[in-house]
Amino acid sequence: MEAMACNKPVVSNTLLYSGINKDELEKGGCFIPLKVNEIGLFIKEALSRHHFSTRELAEKYFGWDSIVTNTLAIYRKILEK
């Protein structure tokens, strides 16, 4: 998240578990290797690109507004049981 907040490219397969659409991540500058041999390729690609919108993704999905909304949804779900 820190790299995204600094508008830097990210190479990580753990973002697949964030609930963010893979296409949106890749379009914004996040590279998702599914195989070990793809890691180096994605690092090279990330270094060759010059425009990223990872900060926008970080604000949209990991900003305080998003955290509060998601936390409240979890609490509401728990209270409904």
Image (tube, helix red, strand yellow):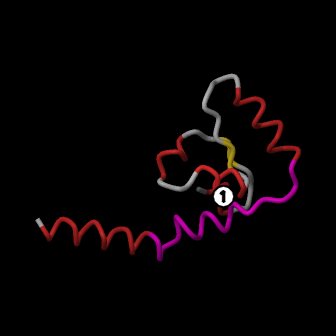
Residue in view at x 48 percent, y 74 percent: 64
Give, as a three-letter code, the residue at label 1.
Met
Residue 76 in the image: state x and y as whole percent. Answer: 22, 72
SS of the residue under disc 1: helix
Quadrant that contains the C terminus: bottom left
**Magenta residues (range):** 49-66
Quarter of the figure with residue 71: bottom left
The extreme top residue here reads: 37
Q: Is residue 3 above or below residue 12?
A: below
Q: List the residue tagged with mark 1.
A: 4
The residue carrying pointer 1 sits among few (fewer than 14), some (14 to 19) or many (20 or more) residues within 10 Å by Cα, namely: many
Quarter of the figure with residue 77: bottom left
The extreme left residue here reads: 81
Residue 59 in the image: state x and y as whole percent. Answer: 59, 70
Q: Is residue 52 magenta?
A: yes
Q: Is residue 50 left or right of residue 80?
A: right
Residue 9 in the image: state x and y as whole percent. Answer: 73, 51
Q: Is residue 54 above or below residue 38?
A: below
Q: Is residue 79 left or right of residue 7?
A: left
Q: Is residue 12 above or below residue 1?
A: above
Residue in view at x 62 percent, y 26 percent: 35
Magenta span: chief secondary structure: helix
Residue 47 in the image: state x and y as whole percent. Answer: 84, 44
Residue in view at x 53 percent, y 65 percent: 61
Q: Which is nearer the eye, 22 or 41?
A: 22
Quadrant that contains the N terminus: bottom right
Quarter of the figure with residue 55: bottom right
Q: Is residue 44 left or right of residue 12?
A: right
Residue in view at x 67 percent, y 42 percent: 11
